[in-house]
Amino acid sequence: MRSAAAAALLAGVACGAQAGLPGLCDRPATLSAAQQHRLLQLAALIRRELQASDASAALIARSGTDLGRFGIRYSHAALALHDNPLSPWAVRQLYYACDEARPRLFDQGLAGFVSGTDDAERGFVSVLLLPPEDGRAVQAAALDKRRALRLLGAAYSANAYAWATTYQNCNQWVAELLADAWQPLADGPAPRAGAQAWLRAQGYEPTAVAVGSHALVFAAQLVPYVHAGDHPLADLQALTMRVSLPASIEAFVQRRLPGAQRLEFCHAGGRAVVRRGGPPLPADCSAGPGDELVALDD
C-alpha cells in the first residue's frame, strides 16, 4: 500500500467532524433534495425498529468513507439513547470540532447521523440493541455529564492506539463509556486508564489495521489528526495499528451480551433493506430471505 492510500485509510476511520461532516474538515457534505429525502426515510426505518424494541440504549454505527477494499465497512460508532434530551433515540457521540481542533461530545438526531457519509447514494447502518438492564446502565452513564466527560480525551487522533490515553477517537470513547457503565470506575486521576484496564481484562480486542510501508510518517504529514507516536514500536515495525473501530466494539458486546439483537440497514438504488440478525448485508445492498425490502421515494 502506498503512503497516499494509507493516509486515506487512516483519515477514513476518522469520526464525524463538526456539524456532522463525515471526514476531513475542509470537505463539506452536499446532498440533493432527493438524497436528503431518502436518508430521512432510512432514519425513519431505524427509528421504527428502535421504538419497537424494549431497549434503552443501542450501539449504532454508520459507514462513512468507503473502506471496503480494506475490509472495513463501519468507521463511526455512537450510542443511540431512548431518553436523549435532544429527542428520543438521538445519538450521543464524540466528534472532532474543526474550529477548535479538539474532540467534543455531541448529540445528533438519527437523520443527521445517517447523513454523515461520503456516499449519499449507498450506505450502511448497524444497530446493536442492548438488553434492558445493560442498556439502562449505558444510558445512565452516557447521560451523566460528569461521567461522560471524564472519559473524553484531551487530544484527538483518528488512528488512536486503543491501549493508550495520549489520544482518543470516537469509537474509543464509546468503548470506554461501556466500561464505566458495566463496571463503574472509581473516582481518580486516570479514569481512561481504568476503563482500558477493565476492557483488557474482559477480552476486548481492538481492530488490527494494516497500514503498509512507511505509511505512518506520510499519513501524519498529510492529515492533521493522524498520529503514530502513541503506537508501540513493535506494531509500527509490523506495519499494524490496533485501533477501536465499530466492528471491534460490536464483537466485544456480542460476546459479553449474547442476547443483544443486531439489526443492519442499507440503502442503494432507491431501496432500503432491513436485516434482523444473520450475516452482514452484501455490499450491493441486495435483500436476502427474511429481509425487509422498502422502496424509497425521491
Image (spheres, helix red, strand yellow):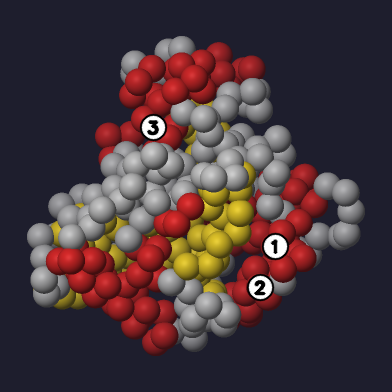
Location of the N terminus (image quadrant): top left
Residue 55 place in picture, x, y as percent: 51, 81
The reply to whether discs 3 and 1 touch (Cβ–Cβ < 8 Å) is no
In the foreground, 108 or 217: 108
| 191 relative to 157 in the view: left or right | right
Residue 194 is marked as none
Residue 143 is marked as 2
Residue at (53% x, 77% y) in the render = 86
Callout 1 amino acid: Ala
Residue at (39% x, 39% y) in the render = 26
In the foreground, 103 or 158: 103
Residue 148 is marked as 1
Residue 164 place in picture, x, y as percent: 70, 36
Which badge, 1 or 2, comes first in the chain's sequence? 2
The answer to whether residue 56 shows anywhere in this view is: no
| 27 relative to 192 in the view: left or right | left
In the foreground, 56 or 224: 224
Q: How many marks?
A: 3
Please tell me whether residue 15 is drawn above or below residue 223 in the rendered image: below
Residue 9 is marked as 3
Q: Residues within 10 Å of mark 3 (few under 14, many from 20)?
A: many
The reply to whether discs 1 and 2 touch (Cβ–Cβ < 8 Å) is yes
Q: Residues within 10 Å of mark 1 (few under 14, many from 20)?
A: many
Q: Residue 212 appears in which quarter of the rendering? A: top left
Residue at (46% x, 12% y) in the render = 214
Which badge, 3 or 2, comes first in the chain's sequence? 3
